Amino acid sequence: MENVEVVAEEIWKELEEASKIEPPLNIKPYYDDMVKKEDPATKELINFKKPSEMTLEEYKQFPAKYNWNSNVKYSLYSINCTSPNAPVRLCHLLMQTAFRLKIFGDDAFGKVSARCKVGSGIVNYLLDKNLVFFPAGAVRARVPVCLRPLNEETFKAAIVELTKCTSDTNHQRNYVGDGDGEPHLAGLGIAPISLTDGTLPGSEILFKRSLHDVKALFESQAYLKNPAAAEVAAARQQSVILDGIAKVLNGQPCNSGSSLTNASQPSMSATTASSSAHNGRNRDDGTVSPNSESSKEEERKKTKSPAVAMAEAALKSQEAAVLEAKNFEAMIKLQREELLIRKEDQLHVRTERTEERRLMVEERKQSNLVLQKIVEKLCPEDDPTERFVARKRKLDELREILGNDVYEAKLKQLKAEFLKASAM
């Protein structure tokens, strides 16, 4: 029972995490309507408690009435009472349990019933832990009821029905919402919680993945085959082949089987007798016959055994593998050289762009200077008085040095420039 609880908690944790990333399609909240109970005194139904308010002992007091029909197995009501943000469907729980236990796995020969028994125990434990009720029908006056305990036969029938009745291969709508994505790769306006790195699936993709795996195992009928017998036959065949290869490498003839050896003994004895008679006749005639041993050796060389052919094929495959490795090494070398060339090209392009940027900055500076000079020429100062006053003061200081004539000429020239500037 402890192992069942441990596996059940692991499966439930996977379903909750997947539901937090993407809840099941069209899922309804946990069914938490008021449950009625019969009053012993009046024999009438009165309000008792909601499932979320019950204890496990109170829940087990209610008789289980529901059968495992399609309405129950494909129900959209969540069976998770602990977290409304992580709804779980019953069919998802069934299929994930079958996927984890490998109900129809390769090593399930004679173990399907035992694994179905464990799976039914897991499902019953989780349904009791979550106090699962289902509506009894369309009439709202009828009280909700809980399911009957699941056994191994019902569990197997439910899994087989799920594999036959579900055909949805859309795997593109599920990788959203675990918050592990890169915001700078998605663009502006997207919250990090809506992104994902793609490692954790949503509830629908988790269900479809487990469904396809269980469906493939069931349709391959691997659970009907005995893996021990197949392993023994493969080991026997491998030992025969290795024995033949060892004989060939030691220079001995390879016998394909004992039956072949036994069958060939009478024919070999008959051949030996005929050859001896022929040799006797040849001796009577006075002619020399070829050696029978040498002829047998030549025939043995002409006819190759399967082990010899296999050994030669293995050698050729090794040679081909060596050539392929050399070609791969040459290809890696070429790719490395191409990468170096690309790095040099990128460095050259980066240098050219830096130089171009520097020239553009210099050109911009020169353009600013030219524009400043043009502006000074086209838009002189509005009041040139201060400039000419400063020149007049400097001219007065040099009056003694220049003399009166030169001073008068410079002053006259300064006045003319002042008048001209003022007129502009």
Image: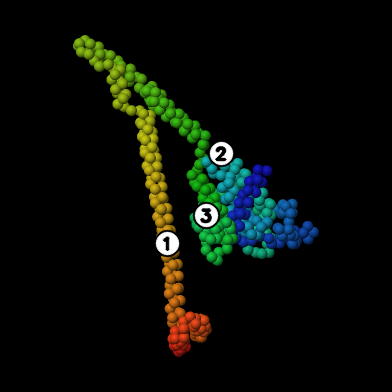
**SS at circle 3:** loop
Residue 247 horizontal/vertical position (percent): 40, 24
In what quadrant of the picture does the N terminus appear?
A: top right
- From where the camera sits, is residue 207 visible? no
How far apart are labels 1 and 2 at the CA level?
78 Å
Question: Which color scheme is applied?
Answer: rainbow
Mark number, residue 110: 2
In what quadrant of the picture does the C terminus appear?
A: bottom left
Crowd rating for badge 2 (residues with CA inside 10 Å; few <14, some 14–19, many 20+):
few
The residue pinned by badge 1 equals 355
The residue nearer to you, when weighing 328 against 348, is 348
- From where the camera sits, is residue 370 visible? yes
The residue pinned by badge 3 equals 166
Q: Is residue 302 above or below residue 212?
A: above
Q: Quadrant of residue 323?
A: top left
Crowd rating for badge 1 (residues with CA inside 10 Å; few <14, some 14–19, many 20+):
few
At x 20% / y 11%, what residue is drawn? Answer: 286
At x 52% / y 34%, what residue is drawn? Answer: 228
Q: Earlier in the sequence, mark 2 or mark 3?
A: 2
Residue 408 horizontal/vertical position (percent): 46, 87
Query: Could you tell whether 368 is left or right of 76 in the image?
Result: left
How far apart are labels 2 and 3 at the CA level?
27 Å
